[in-house]
Amino acid sequence: MAPAKGHFTILYFAAAASFTARSTDELPAPVQACSLFAQLEERYPGITLKVLSSCAVTVNLEYIDIDEDDGLTIKEGDEVAIIPPVSSG
Amino acid sequence: MASSTIVESLRKQIASCEAQLKDLRRQLAEAEHYQQQQREQDSLHQTTAAYSDPFTHDMSYGIHDDFRSEVFAALSHVEVGSPSRKWPLDKTEYKRYGRQLIMPEIGLQGQLCLKEASVLIVGVGGLGCPAAAYLVGSGVGTVGLIDGDIVEESNLHRQVLHSTASVGMSKVDSARVALNSLNPNVRLVAHPSRLTSESAISILQDYDVVLDCTDTPASRYLISDACVLLGKPLVSASALRTDGQLMVLNYPPRPVGDPSGGPCYRCVFPKPPPAESVVSCGDGGILGPVVGVMGVLQALEAIKLLTRQTNEVFRHVEPKPADPPTLLIFSAYSNPMFRSIRLRNRRQKCAACSAQSSVTPEALKSGSLDYVQFCGTISPINALASNERISAENYAKIRLEVNPYTGMEPDKDSHILVDVREKVQFGLCSLEGSLNVPFSTITTTLPNLANTWHNDEIPQAQGWVTELKNHPEKPIFVICRLGNDSQLSVKKMKELGLDHSGQRWIGDIKGGLKAWRNNVDREFPEY
Ligand SMILES: [Zn+2]
């Protein structure tokens, strides 16, 4: 499902879905990848320390490195996923 | 120092020679098989040619080559069928594995690869049980099982090798019984204890492929590090609630520092999840088929790895580079249920597999790498002062006993009991008169309404605060399942000002409902 105009979709899995109590959000695009966590922290206080710091982040099903991918921009219509490590089994 | 290097080097040489020998034996078995087939076909050609049967001519030309040789083979089996005939597989194996033998992805060569292979399954629980069942069923020659746990009743809904009768038995023994009856041809190796960093290298080195079916962050990093150091492919899976993850790691298993090798667990998740997210009482739910799916997929990936060579050599499929590494996400209640994430190559600064690696075999063996500490300690939470806590027995007195001095009946209305378990758990069983405010609601409640993002959710999320503020004189007792979330909830309630600057007592019931059941009411359900 495509996000509304001028937005991107963000999917929350596992602990990220538990923390935000939702599986998806639509956020305004464009946004710098490196400022994504700060934006999420504003909306879900505490999420950076408790969830995001250990998560894998993907854009359109590709793994990205928030700290090292300087200048990467999340664009309108992109699908971002927040994937915390699941360790149980 | 020098002698230990020599020992290490000799060990490596022996291992490499053994692997070579194993491969040569397999090649020999195949070559002998083909030689024999060839001979029989030749002799059959001669025999049939010797008969000047008028139909011979038609037979040779009117039928497709493949079919003809198949017929010859069948005939030769009947006519020649000498007792010295040597087949690469046992007669019963042809029958048992028949349905996968006729798959072009496996075939005879694939089956021989499986038979020669050894797979180590670390953790014989929700993932390990189905993975082991399919690998043993498929005829993997040697399957190793590691687990230090005992079978419990609450394991049975998902750990499909264990039965009601094996409750109390070690998981490794229970699995051995089940697997042996499934396929007695497979050699099962039991390691009935938890994998430690000291033992990891010596246990893992005997196997071709490792399956991580464990349940803690610490063991995931340990197994990944050991696989990187030993050059073993690792099939890693996990599951919680309705979500699962699957990765084939360190594949191709190139040496440490070689950027063309597959990424390791640290490359994908360099930082462990915070320890308290693993301790939380709300954690721990799991749907059987969710973890089952992930375990079955691990078995599939292991079979693909072990028979990969077959496909290239014998099906004349172009040897292609290994599939790009992926992280498969399973989310049972999402649409789509599966998402495949393309991973990157090895991380340039990875602590385990890069040229800058700090993880060494020596560090692992000596135990100087503390995986438990790396992932954070999981000691019980002790967040409250002793005057903010009450034992289950003392709370029971408040609830159940007549006051010996005043003769007053116990009154549940004299205080508020807040149960902070999630709604579903509260629905299973609760103490009479308790008010349910889920821990997740408490932790996400903001002191300042203006900061709240979802305006539509304010009334519901803040409703509990208003409700508790309506009775400022009543003390609040907080209870949860095990006594962790209740402490954090008490702290949060005080932050939110519910204690009216210390005028109202707010405290937790030590040990939660578990303590209530153990010390007060044996009939209260355990789940
Ligand atoms: Zn790595």
Image: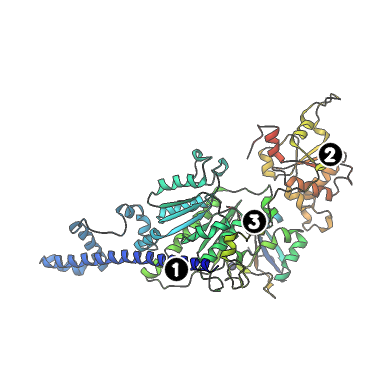
- Residue drawn at x 70%, y 45% is B422
Q: Does the beta carbon at disc 3 come under 8 Å from ligand 1?
A: no
Furthest residue in direction bottom, as rendered: A71
Are labels 1 and 3 assigned to the same chain? yes
Q: Is residue B53 left or right of residue B93?
A: left
Furthest residue in direction top, as rendered: B407
Tag in front: 1 or 3? 1
In this rendered view, identify the residue nearer to me: A77 or B446: B446
Which chain's residue wears label 1? B
For residue B451, what is the image quadrant?
Answer: bottom right
Structural distance between the alpha carbons of marks 3 and 2: 39 Å
Three-letter amino acid code at the position of disc 3: Val
Position of residue A69 measured from the top left corner of the image (x, y, whole percent): 67, 73
Three-letter amino acid code at the position of disc 1: Gln
Three-letter amino acid code at the position of disc 2: Pro
Return the disc, 3 or 2, that comes first in the chain's sequence: 3
Residue B372 bears which disc, if any? 3
| Mark 2 nearby-residue class (10 Å; few <14, some 14–19, many ≥20) | some
User: Which residue matches tag 1?
Assistant: B13
Position of residue B339 measured from the top left corner of the image (x, y, whole percent): 57, 62
Return the disc, 1 or 2, that comes first in the chain's sequence: 1
| Mark 3 nearby-residue class (10 Å; few <14, some 14–19, many ≥20) | some
Q: Which quadrant contains ligand 1?
A: bottom right
Tag in front: 1 or 2? 1
Position of residue B78 measured from the top left corner of the image (x, y, whole percent): 20, 56
Furthest residue in direction left, as rendered: B52
- Residue drawn at x 55%, y 46% is B149
Structural distance between the alpha carbons of marks 1 and 3: 33 Å
User: Which residue matches tag 2?
Assistant: B475
Structural distance between the alpha carbons of marks 1 and 2: 71 Å
The type of colouring in the image is rainbow
Return the disc, 1 or 3, that comes first in the chain's sequence: 1
